[in-house]
Amino acid sequence: MFFENNDLHAKMASAQDTDGDGKVSPQEAAAYVQQYLQNASPEDRTRMMHDYFGQLSPDQKSAIGTALVQSPATPVTSVDPNNDHDLVDAYTKSAQAPATANGQSPLEAAFAQGGMLSSPLVKAGLVGLAGIIGSRLLRH
């Protein structure tokens, strides 16, 4: 069902709004990324996330790794930000973990206002990742 939702993929690919507020919020992007990570094959998921982390600076990788470990919403207890495989694993575990008490995925909770990943730079990267995923899914 997720993979057949071309309207959603197109919205994310063009960074369009999905809830009528004029922009794709980090929470919307996190929900989309979570759906992708839960539904994609392990090979596609790993390839997509390695491509994403390969584009980030060492500082961005470090910020994401630290935030995933420090967020009480994620199941991640350690991550090596210098190892893209470790970052992919931590990000995927966070997206696939059970929902929090308020119904958010741990990934969404980590990116929510006041969450450990609420840095504007990290949030922009998340919206970019959603755009990359949407673009690739539309091409396939």
Image: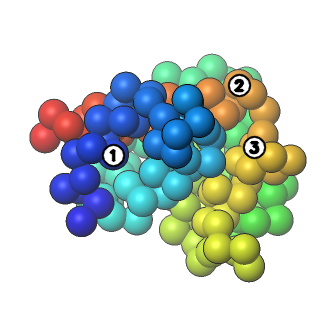
The part of the image, by quadrant, that contains residue 35 is: bottom left
Q: Secondary structure at mark 2?
A: helix
Distance Cα–Cα, label 2 vs label 1: 24 Å
Residue highlighted by disc 1: 8
- Where disc 1 sits, the SS reads helix
Q: Nearer the viewer, residue 130 or 20?
A: 20
Whether residue 47 is visible to the viewer of this picture, yes or no, is no
Q: Are marks 3 and 1 in contact (CB under 8 Å)?
A: no
Q: Residue at x 66, y 34 (%)?
A: 123
Q: Amino acid at mark 2?
A: Leu
Along the viewing direction, whichever of 87 and 105 lies nearer the viewer: 105
Residue at numbered disc 2:
121
In front: label 2 or label 1? 1
How far apart in space, not on screen, are marks 3 and 2 (Cα)? 9 Å
Q: Residue at x 40, y 36 (%)?
A: 12
135 to the left or right of 124: left
Tell me the CA gap for discs 3 and 1: 24 Å
Q: Residues within 10 Å of mark 2 (few under 14, many from 20)?
A: few
Badge 3 or badge 1: first in the primary sequence = 1
Instruction: Name the secondary structure under disc 3.
Output: loop
Q: Amino acid at mark 3?
A: Leu
Identify residue for label 3.
117
Q: Position of residue 132 (x, y in %)?
A: 37, 32
Q: Residues within 10 Å of mark 1 (few under 14, many from 20)?
A: some
Q: Is residue 30 above or below residue 42?
A: above
Which dot marks residue 135?
Answer: none
Describe residue 106's horizontal placement relative to residue 140 as left or right: right
Residue at point 45%, 51% (across, down): 32
